[in-house]
Amino acid sequence: MAKKTSKSKSASSSDEIRYEELIDQLETIVDRIESGEIGLEESIKSYEEGIGLVARARGILDRAEQRIVELNADQLDDTDTE
């Protein structure tokens, strides 16, 4: 049986859990659903929870990608002025 990840882990000032923790929670949900250890209703609730976790993980990735774009643009600006 997969261990359940606690949602009450320490979070950053924006109350956002780390990307890796989201992935761990998603893996736990997938394991529980695939193993058949939970019934249909709980599977649906878990699936809905997983959809929310995926959205949060995508948000983190989008912000990381945007930051990389900004850093690259800053780097290009710095080399253009030299």
Image (cartoon, rainbow, N blue to C red):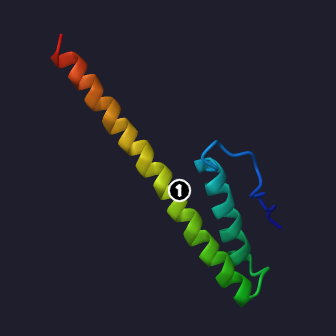
Q: Is residue 8 above or below residue 31?
A: above
Q: Position of residue 81 (x, y in %)?
A: 17, 14
Q: Position of residue 22 (x, y in %)?
A: 62, 56
Q: Farthest residue to the bottom: give it.
A: 40
Q: Determine which quarter of the picture holds residue 26.
A: bottom right
Q: Nearer the viewer, residue 1 or 58?
A: 58
| Residue, disc 1 | 57
Q: Position of residue 17 (x, y in %)?
A: 64, 50
Picture mark count: 1
Q: Determine which quarter of the picture holds residue 40.
A: bottom right
Name the residue located 73 percent from the left edge and 73 percent from the top edge: 32
10 Å crowding of disc 1: few (<14), some (14-19), many (20+) = many
For the N terminus, give its image quadrant.
Answer: bottom right
Q: Farthest residue to the front: give it.
A: 13
For the C terminus, give its image quadrant.
Answer: top left
Q: Nearer the viewer, residue 14 or 44?
A: 14
Q: Position of residue 24 (x, y in %)?
A: 67, 56
Give the secondary structure at mark 1: helix
Name the residue located 60 percent from the left edge and 47 percent from the top edge: 14
Q: Farthest residue to the top: give it.
A: 82
Q: Is residue 56 left or right of residue 82?
A: right
Q: Determine which quarter of the picture holds residue 71.
A: top left
Q: Nearer the viewer, residue 71 or 36?
A: 71
Q: Is residue 49 above or below residue 55?
A: below
Q: Is residue 24 above or below residue 79?
A: below
Q: Is residue 20 left or right of residue 60?
A: right
Q: Looking at the picture, which amino acid does disc 1 mark?
A: Ala
